[in-house]
Image (cartoon, rainbow, N blue to C red):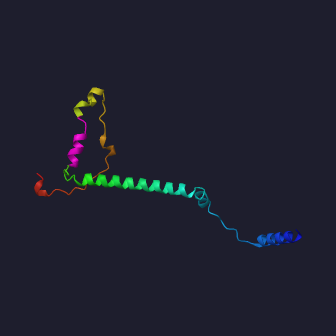
Amino acid sequence: QECQRRQQKVKAQEVADCSFRPNINTRHQRKQKLSATERLYMMGKDRMKEREETRQQYENWKVWSQCTFQPETNAEINRALQTKAKYNQPSQTSRGATEPVDDTRECTFQPVVNALPREFMS
């Protein structure tokens, strides 16, 4: 017994003298809590999901690759068709507005215009 105590004391002294303390990855410890069969089952489930997504993408590509018609659209006409008719809106005079509304306050564009030649002026 005395011998065992001495050995334990010597081991404790050796451990106390060690300055290195390893940092253990806690994420790794959590993963090891699953058994091998559970871990493999989860991996298989993930792979099946990836395969299904890939198959779905392939099916979509197959369908869309057969659609060859691509109409040429005019963006200006599309915007014009989306505007509301002004005749449906009440006019300013019917609202009783006496002051003209200055809609140009928000306009920031100021074009640079060339001077007209004298030949064009009357």
Query: Which residue shows up at 11% across the image and 54% down it?
Result: 120
Quadrant in which residue 84 is drawn? top left
Q: Position of residue 19 (x, y in %)?
A: 73, 71
Going by the image, does 74 lie left or right of 21?
left
The quarter of the displayed image where residue 100 is located:
top left
Q: Which residue does the image show at 57% across and 56% down from the upper left? A: 35
Q: Is residue 33 above or below residue 8?
A: above
Q: Where 78 falls versus 46 (above or below)? A: above
The image position of residue 36, as x and y in percent, is 55, 58
Find out whether residue 14 is within the magenta segment. no
Tell me where the magenta segment starts and ends, as one range: 74-85
Location of residue 92 with respect to 31 vertically, above or below: above
Main structural element of the magenta stretch: helix, strand or loop? helix
| Nearer-the-camera pick, 21 or 59 | 59
- Residue drawn at (23%, 48%), measured in percent from left and top? 75
Residue reaching furthest to the right: 2
20 left or right, relative to 82: right
Provide residue 29's location: percent of width, then percent of height.
Answer: 61, 59
Return the x and y of residue 28 as percentages of the image width and height.
Answer: 59, 61
Q: How many marks?
A: 0
Q: Is residue 79 magenta?
A: yes
32 and 120: which is toward the camera: 32
Viewer-proximal residue among 16 and 115: 16
The quarter of the image holding the N terminus is bottom right
In the image, taking residue 17 as reference, residue 104 lies left or right, namely left
